[in-house]
Amino acid sequence: QVQLVESGGGLVQPGGSLRLSCAASGSIFSANAMGWYRQSPGKQRELVAIMSSGGSSGYADSVKGRFTISRDNAKSTVYLQMNNLKPEDTAVYYCNYRKIVSGIGYWGQGTQVTVSS
């Protein structure tokens, strides 16, 4: 089992910034991918950004140039720096940890991000 603890959500004005953190604990494997997904009311959960333990990363087109994913493998922690936030970024953001070999994934409890003036 892997436990994920997220932090950093909140209310921010358009154009503002937030930094999300997600710390993993438990049965951590060296080959893994950690990422962020989001879900807003009435919509499916969508990938925001993902980074493998080897450093490869990917982003949704809607956040490219504004969001940056990073990770500290020693701390099993992934971060999402979100800049120039827009109202359409409002959603519950979920951390995901996936074991690359088995494909087994785990989810955090989610953290609310609200972008509003």
Image: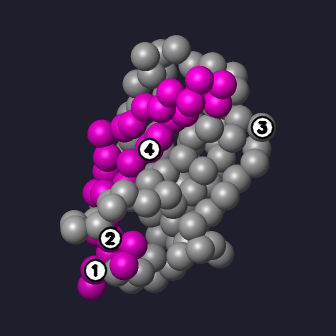
Structural distance between the alpha carbons of marks 3 and 1: 36 Å
Estimate the x, y position of residue 67 in percent, counting from the top left: 58, 66
**Residue 92 versus residue 80: which sits nearer the camera?**
92
Q: Which residue is mark 2?
A: 90
Residue type marked 3: Gly
Quote the CA–CA distance across marks 3 and 2.
30 Å
The three-letter amino acid code for the residue at tag 1 is: Ser
Sooner in the amino-acid sequence: mark 3 or mark 2:
3
The reply to whether residue 11 is in sight is: no
**Would you say 42 lies left or right of 67 here?**
left
* 3 vs 1, front mark: 3
Question: Is residue 103 shown left or right of residue 90?
Answer: right
Q: Could you tell me if residue 35 is visible in this image?
A: yes
Give the residue displayed 33% in from the left and 61% down from the top: 44
Judge the density around disc 1: few (<14), some (14-19), many (≥20) Cα neighbours within 10 Å.
some
Q: Residue furthest left?
A: 41
Mark 4 and mark 2 residues within 8 Å of each other at the beta carbon: no
The residue under label 4 is 95
Q: Which residue is mark 1?
A: 116
- Mark 4: amino acid: Cys
Residue 32 coordinates in the image, percent (x, y): 64, 31
Instruction: Please give the residue where the numbered disc 3 appears in the rendered image.
Output: 54
